[in-house]
């Protein structure tokens, strides 16, 4: 009887303790990019799996069709917000960006600083305006009495929605980093730590590399500032009154969550306020028991000893690439008749298929995780989206990463530095001979496979599990929503005082004065000595 009573008491205490620490969390999940939505959906699942009450608020910026089923936890409440122009969005084709395939202009930082903010900001404008003007929805959300809200920093409507609901907001980013936000949490400049496009890292970096880094960093910051400024103005107009500056709202949070993993990403000076959650989308238990391939793919993988998968993601599509790029890839197919290629090609094109050799299979969709888990797949040719980079790293598979735009160049060299991947220039896809050589080298040289496996082991044995790291910091932030003592006070200073430029300039000036006096004194003494010597002579 005593034992049973004790057991009941323990169960009661466990349930009661769980209820005490259960928080009611609103997560803002704007529907505009699949990789973003996938990351946020996984974020919601993890938080709900840890016993918290989660509501996912999803305003549609485009009529994305492939997001059903991303949220797995049945306890999550999903509130889809369809704007008045949603029927128009449904008629539009899912937006792709074929211009990024061969446009060198889009990689010019000056152009990006003045074009991209309006292009991206305008895509958010209509839905964001309606959400913030919809008093019915605002009242319904306010009545829910959420403890905290989580919002991504690429589309900042959620940050202002939290302000209107008068609840603390925890910002996060579904990409590896967003420097203008990281700086608000004490992270210093990434110059010298993270190379920009066209630059080498230290110790190989030279003057040109440093100059290129400064140039690109400057205009990247302007691009991000202008995008947020554009959104800030749209939001202020929607609300109809002055609103706090976006930086002032963001830096109220005790933490900033990113999709970076410290064992995959570059080593960058940081603070305890920046939480690295990269890897939370990877289910290690599932990877031990990967999804079974269909009979069709089983047959494809047994055709030849080696198989290569080619996929450029969902935003940039293979069928829209320039004909010269396709010609280079086809030449590579012909040069490697003993290799089977599975190419994710999103359009039925009978005539194009006739131009391909028999060792190529075109597929409008591929079971990417299952294929990466299969030992018969030797190499993955990818665009370098962060989702694919994570899957690659956790699969231990060699890869050729062909970045097209956005954060993909960073992701490509981030993975390449671990030795299991090659970052390949998209403009060299038209060089079939070079592409053949790289794939041949990757399949024959075991160091790529060995290095990829080492990275896999590192990620599987990292000291702190990314999910646990996320939850511990999130629960801390909910308990202490105004805690900012981990952000260096110097972060509030301007660039001159932050880097002690005034003190350094003063010391240089003093040294210069003393050096001048010393030189003049030596000259005087020398002159006197020469005069005396002349008289003596």
Image (spheres, helix red, strand yellow):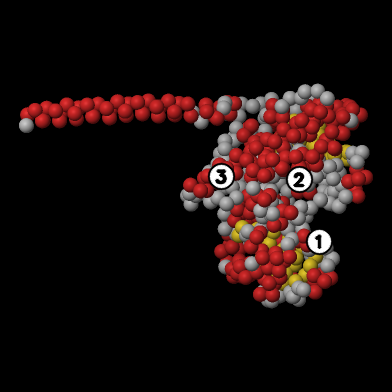
Earlier-in-chain disc, 3 versus 2: 2
- Residue that extends furthest to the left in the rendered view of this protein: 537
Mark yes or no: residue 119 visible: yes
**Labels 1 & 2 near each other (Cβ < 8 A):** no
Residue at image mark 3: 213
Quadrant of the image containing the N terminus: top right
Q: Residue at x 90, y 48 (%)?
A: 90
Residue at image mark 2: 36
Mark yes or no: residue 15 visible: no
**301 over 83 or under it: above or below:** below
Q: Quadrant of residue 432?
A: bottom right
Crowd around label 1: few <14 · some 14–19 · many ≥20 (10 Å): some
Q: Position of residue 380 (x, y in %)?
A: 68, 62
Q: Residue at x 75, y 67 (%)?
A: 342
Given residues 384 and 388, the one toward you in this image is: 384
Residue at image mark 1: 346
Marks 1 and 2: which is nearer the front? 1
């Amino acid at each position: 009887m005593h034992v049973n009573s004790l057991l009941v008491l323990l169960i009661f205490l466990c349930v009661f303790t769980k209820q005490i620490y259960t928080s009611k969390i609103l997560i803002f999940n704007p529907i505009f990019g699949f990789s973003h939505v996938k990351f946020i959906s996984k974020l919601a699942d993890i938080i709900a799996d840890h016993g918290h009450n989660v509501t996912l608020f999803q305003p549609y910026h485009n009529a994305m069709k492939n997001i059903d089923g991303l949220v797995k936890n049945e306890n999550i409440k999903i509130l889809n917000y369809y704007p008045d122009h949603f029927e128009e969005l449904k008629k539009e084709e899912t937006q792709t960006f074929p211009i990024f395939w061969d446009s060198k202009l889009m990689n010019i930082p000056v152009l990006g600083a003045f074009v991209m903010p309006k292009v991206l900001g305008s895509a958010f404008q209509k839905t964001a305006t309606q959400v913030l003007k919809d008093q019915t929805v605002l009242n319904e959300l306010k009545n829910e009495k959420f403890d905290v809200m989580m919002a991504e920093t690429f589309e900042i409507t959620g940050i202002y929605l939290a302000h209107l609901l008068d609840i603390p907001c925890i910002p996060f980013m579904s990409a590896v980093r967003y420097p203008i936000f990281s700086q608000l949490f004490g992270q210093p400049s990434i110059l010298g730590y993270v190379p920009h496009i066209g630059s080498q890292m230290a110790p190989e970096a030279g003057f040109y590399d440093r100059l290129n880094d400064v140039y690109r960093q400057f205009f990247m910051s302007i691009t991000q500032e202008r995008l947020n400024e554009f959104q800030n103005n749209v939001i202020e107009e929607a609300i109809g009154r002055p609103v706090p500056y976006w930086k002032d709202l963001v830096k109220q949070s005790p933490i900033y969550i990113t999709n970076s993993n410290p064992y995959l990403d570059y080593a960058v000076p940081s603070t305890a306020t920046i939480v690295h959650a990269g890897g939370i989308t990877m289910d290690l238990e599932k990877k031990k028991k990967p999804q079974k391939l269909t009979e069709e793919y089983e047959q494809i993988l047994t055709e030849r000893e080696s198989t290569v998968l080619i996929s450029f993601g969902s935003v940039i599509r293979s069928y829209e690439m320039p004909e010269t790029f396709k010609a280079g890839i086809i030449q590579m197919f012909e040069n490697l008749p003993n290799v089977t290629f599975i190419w994710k090609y999103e359009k039925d094109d009978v005539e194009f298929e006739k131009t391909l050799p028999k060792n190529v299979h075109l597929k409008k969709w591929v079971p990417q995780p299952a294929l990466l888990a299969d030992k018969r797949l030797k190499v993955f040719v990818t665009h370098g989206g962060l989702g694919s980079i994570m899957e690659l790293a956790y699969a231990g598979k060699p890869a050729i990463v062909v970045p097209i735009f956005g954060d993909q160049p960073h992701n490509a060299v981030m993975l390449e530095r671990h030795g299991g991947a090659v970052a390949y220039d998209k403009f060299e896809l038209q060089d079939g001979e070079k592409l053949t050589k790289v794939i041949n080298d990757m399949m024959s040289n075991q160091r790529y496979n060995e290095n990829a496996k080492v990275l896999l082991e590192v990620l599987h044995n990292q000291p702190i599990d990314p999910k646990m790291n996320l939850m511990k910091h999130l629960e801390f932030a909910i308990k202490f929503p105004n805690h900012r003592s981990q952000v260096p006070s110097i972060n509030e200073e301007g660039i001159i005082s932050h880097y002690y430029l005034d003190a350094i300039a003063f010391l240089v000036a003093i040294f210069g004065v003393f050096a001048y006096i010393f030189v003049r004194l030596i000259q005087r003494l020398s002159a006197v000595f020469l005069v005396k010597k002349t008289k003596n002579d």
